[in-house]
């Protein structure tokens, strides 16, 4: 995907005024596979970034040690290794942790072209970090070690092997207890997955069901039905949640004005945005921003 990868030592983009840093994936060469894997140490200090930021890529983290919290979309999740977490493009996260250890797998959306259904599994996995039992931890460690070895030492056909191993890792992670798999019809699943992926791309500015339907290439009516079949929820409900989530990210993580935040999430009228935000959260944008310094609620998985 254009603009999601850069060559090593490429300077980070300066964020626009009031916006969060946006990190791109470093790759070995302009035509290299949009993928990398390694430990927190080999990936580098940015893999432990202690400040809120976004990615243009997916991140799968297998945490094997450490104490503290992983903060995802401003919700604190206590580290409880062994643990698996997925960060999708556009999510905001940072680490408030000590002695953090484990493996990090990074890849862009292009890496999933052969297995597009993996996007939906990753979306469901991104809802929270997942504590692994002994069997799942051993299996995950083995799969990630294979990915790491193939990435560092592979030869002819390495790209195919890495894609195959990643598909297996994602499918097996999708079997974790508590991760629902409704298995809707294939067409509805594909449309629902693409809808969720586009909702995770706030930079596209697609803040209406009609705009998303046009981008996907279906009618708004079909999109509404497909999303309901694929997720059990309405497209409008998911859209409201996405706009609220994005507004919270701007209010908590930037110094943009309420008018600017409203514009960023598709509201031409700031007053209407304020009514929308209060209806969805019970707070005005200003109240939410003022109470943002209070420690977020800690969740235990």
Image (spheres, grey):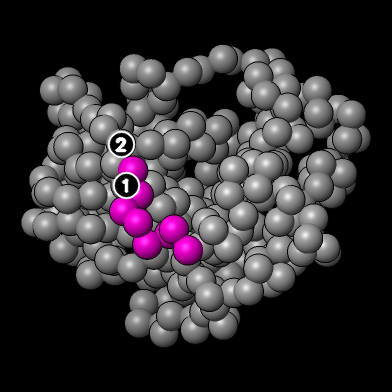
Give the image quarter of residue 260: bottom right
In the image, is 209 to the left or to the right of 69? right
Q: Tag 2 or tag 1, which sits nearer the N-term? A: 1
Q: Give the residue displayed 65% in from the left and 48% down from the top.
A: 278
| Nearer to us in this view, 284 or 22 | 284
The spot of residue 164 in percent (x, y) is: 41, 36
Residue annotated with mark 1: 76
In the image, is 21 to the left or to the right of 46? right
Which quadrant, please, contains the C terminus?
top left
The spot of residue 60 in percent (x, y) is: 35, 46
Residue annotated with mark 2: 299
Question: Dot 1: what SS?
Answer: strand
Give the image quarter of residue 80: top left
What is the tally of numbered marks visible in this picture?
2
Magenta span: 290-297
**Label of residue 94 in the image:** none
| 220 relative to 49, above or below | above
| 235 relative to 229, above or below | below
Badge 1 vs badge 2, beta-carbon distance below 8 Å: yes
The spot of residue 280 in percent (x, y) is: 64, 41
| 270 relative to 256, above or below | above
Is residue 108 visible to the viewer in this orientation of the structure? no
Q: Give the residue displayed 65% in from the left and 68% down from the top.
A: 258
Question: Dot 2: what SS?
Answer: strand
Q: Give the residue displayed 58% in from the left and 70% down from the top.
A: 3
| Nearer to us in this view, 95 or 58 | 95
The spot of residue 222 in percent (x, y) is: 86, 27
Task: Give the CA separation, mark 1 to mark 2.
Answer: 6 Å
Q: Give the residue displayed 58% in from the left and 49% down from the top.
A: 283
Q: Within 10 angstroms of label 1, few (less than 14), some, or many (20 or more) residues?
A: many
Assess whether residue 299 is covered by the magenta stretch.
no
């Amino acid at each position: 995907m254009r603009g999601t990868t850069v060559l090593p030592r490429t300077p980070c983009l300066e964020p626009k005024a009031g916006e969060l840093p946006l990190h791109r994936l470093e790759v070995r060469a302009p035509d290299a596979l949009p993928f990398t894997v390694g430990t927190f140490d080999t990936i580098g200090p940015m893999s432990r970034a202690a400040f809120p930021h976004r990615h243009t890529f997916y991140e799968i983290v297998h945490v094997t040690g450490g104490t503290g919290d992983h903060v995802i979309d401003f919700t604190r999740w206590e580290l409880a290794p062994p643990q698996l977490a997925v960060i999708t493009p556009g999510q905001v996260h940072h680490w408030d942790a000590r002695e953090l250890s484990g493996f990090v797998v990074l890849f862009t959306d292009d890496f999933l072209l052969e297995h597009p259904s993996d996007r939906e599994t990753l979306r469901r996995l991104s809802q929270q970090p997942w504590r692994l039992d002994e069997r799942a931890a051993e299996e995950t460690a083995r799969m990630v070690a294979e990915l790491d070895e193939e990435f560092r030492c592979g030869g002819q056909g390495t790209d195919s092997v890495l894609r195959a191993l990643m598909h297996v890792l994602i499918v097996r992670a999708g079997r974790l207890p508590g991760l629902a798999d409704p298995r809707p019809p294939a067409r509805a699943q594909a449309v629902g997955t693409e809808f969720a992926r586009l909702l995770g791309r706030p930079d596209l500015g697609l803040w209406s069901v009609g705009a998303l339907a046009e981008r996907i290439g279906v009618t708004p009516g079909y999109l509404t039905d497909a999303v309901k079949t694929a997720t059990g929820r309405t497209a409008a409900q998911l859209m409201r949640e996405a706009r609220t989530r994005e507004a919270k990210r701007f209010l908590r993580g930037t110094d943009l004005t309420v008018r600017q935040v409203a514009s960023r999430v598709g509201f031409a009228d700031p007053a209407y945005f304020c009514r929308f935000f209060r209806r969805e959260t019970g707070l005005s944008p200003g109240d939410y921003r003022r109470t943002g310094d209070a420690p977020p609620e800690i969740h235990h998985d």
